[in-house]
Amino acid sequence: MSGKEHTPSKYRAIIQESKSGRGKPIEKLVEDARSIPDPYYQALALFGLSADRRTSEALAKTLIKDSIQLSDKEARAWRKAELLTTMCKKAKNNPASMHDLIRNEVMEKIWNFPKGKGQSDAVIGCAGFLGCPYMHGLLKLAAKNSGFEMETCKPLLRQWAKDCPSFPNTSLEDMVKILASMPASLMKVKLHGYLHVQITRSGNDDLVVLENALSHAMKLSDDERIQSIKYLADQSSKLEELELIATAITELGEPVNEASLFSTLAANADKSGHKDLALDWFTTGLDILEEVDDKEKRALARIKLATGLRRLGNQELADKTLEKALEDAEGDEKITAKVRKAIGTPSKDQDPVHQETHISENTSQDVKRHTLGLYDTYEGGLKPVHIRMVARAAPLCVAYDLDLALFGFPEKDLPRLIKKVLNDTNIGKGGKYLKDLQKQGRISLIKCSQQVPPSEDDWKDIGLPIATTSRPANNKDTCLETALEKAIASHPKKHLCMIMGLGKKGLPQSLLNSVDHHMELTGHNIALETATAMGIIAQMLGSLGV
């Protein structure tokens, strides 16, 4: 047996003997633990022994301090973070009287952790045990960890809103001050918006955080300012929130952007049941467009507003808006084609496959289904494996009444991709099931990559994202029932999108970092072959209904 294999075995043997309470005295076990050459396993062994009932209080304190100090000898940041996280999880085995000592020692290590992913992992992994007394310090670290602010701050803000609003020195004002100290950016606004959502869910109807978010948004450059306000509008559903954002929109002084944002605001008002207000804001957007001189921009904005009006049920006004868009687009073939597509009239060069796709989008628009997501992790162009997996997914989606989302596939045109699948495989009754899905508008092609995950707007259209993995992050691990409750409570579509990775790599880390919910399918952390996982996911989603 090699030294590498022997080290964890020795650690486990020490802990097992300690738990048995028989055999070697505690002093001998401590001696054995200190002889482990790998500081990672030596630290775990000493920490485990600190919880042994035979250990005196003085010895337990020494073992705790020594074990946590040993983390400094682990040169790899990710492994050091993993070590501290493991200790925090195992701390429940120690007497409550030792918890403050453990917290102080761990927090000191995290505070001195080099900036980067390692510190982010340590903060997220240990926050649950460190709890409210350290929330202020943890959020400060997260806010200053460049490149990892969003993924680190979000779970902290969620934990704070759930557990800590009334805890000393962690008031809402304290949390807002930390976020306000961050450099001006879209991310800063998004974190304010995220905090607002969290406190709203916990029963706090105060608009101060949303007001601050809008204030920070208005200070950004043109594009980021618009993105920020759109993000805040998408996060809002209550009447007072929507009206506050409407006031900010009118202060922009940019007619095209104002019209577009009123369309977004109206769509969210519609989803929240404020249909009269939604119509007012759609018509406000139309009125504002009359001030726009650029015909192309005017036509594109009218398409967006008409789409929203159609969803609202005002077909007559939507048709009139699209007629005006056609007038604006006169002489521009590309814009005219976009308007005709919105109307439902295919352009002359549109092939039958494109016509089917358009018809299907309309027929499936209001049906709510859960979504099976396939995330491409292969390099290069379209391969036979892509063809096979799409073909295999189609009958599952029909059988369990699911939609299908294809993430990052190396094909920009969905009808062309479907045509290739139909030409290259007979899986699913010669492609019948795939054709059925296409005709019903139940297939989405999402632009993303292994490095850049889908946007928040994508998830709003598809469903609450659940990343399936054999190694879920501890702070993100969930079950199907809990995920569905969250989707029903907070997601515009009220349903789930469970995503699996194509190939041996599983899902890319960028996606695992960006979504809030992970799920392990087997209960035993076993990685499954792609087709097997696909079948299990389809059955699980199908069992939920809609």
Image (cartoon, rainbow, N blue to C red):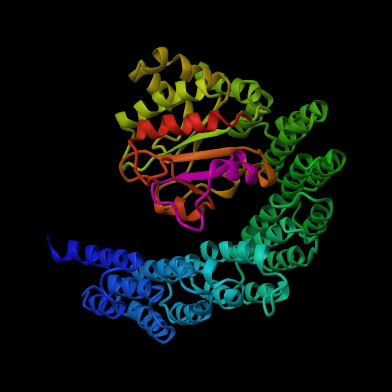
Query: Would you place residue 516 above or below residue 196 in this image?
Result: above
Locate the N terminus by quadrant: bottom left
Question: Whole-percent x and y of residue 349?
Answer: 52, 20
Q: Nearer the viewer, residue 200 or 213?
A: 200
Q: Quadrant of residue 492?
A: top right
Q: Residue at x 45, y 65 (%)?
A: 89
Query: Would you place residue 109 above or below residue 124 in this image?
Result: below
Locate the C terminus by quadrant: top right
Q: Any magenta on residue 476?
A: yes
Q: Any magenta on residue 350?
A: no
Q: Tell whether 292 sits left or right of 402.
A: right
* Residue 176 visible: yes
Question: Whole-percent x and y of residue 439?
Answer: 55, 19
For this orientation, the residue located farthest to the front is 22
Question: Whole-percent x and y of residue 146?
Answer: 48, 71
Q: Nearer the viewer, residue 156 or 448?
A: 156
Q: Tell whether 347 sits left or right of 378.
A: right
Q: Tell whether 21 sits left or right of 308.
A: left
Query: Would you place residue 519 above or below residue 72 in this image?
Result: above
The boundaries of the magenta stretch are 461-486
Q: Residue at x 42, y 78 (%)?
A: 113
Q: Nearer the viewer, residue 13 or 287?
A: 13
* Residue 147 visible: no
For this orientation, the residue located farthest to the bottom is 58
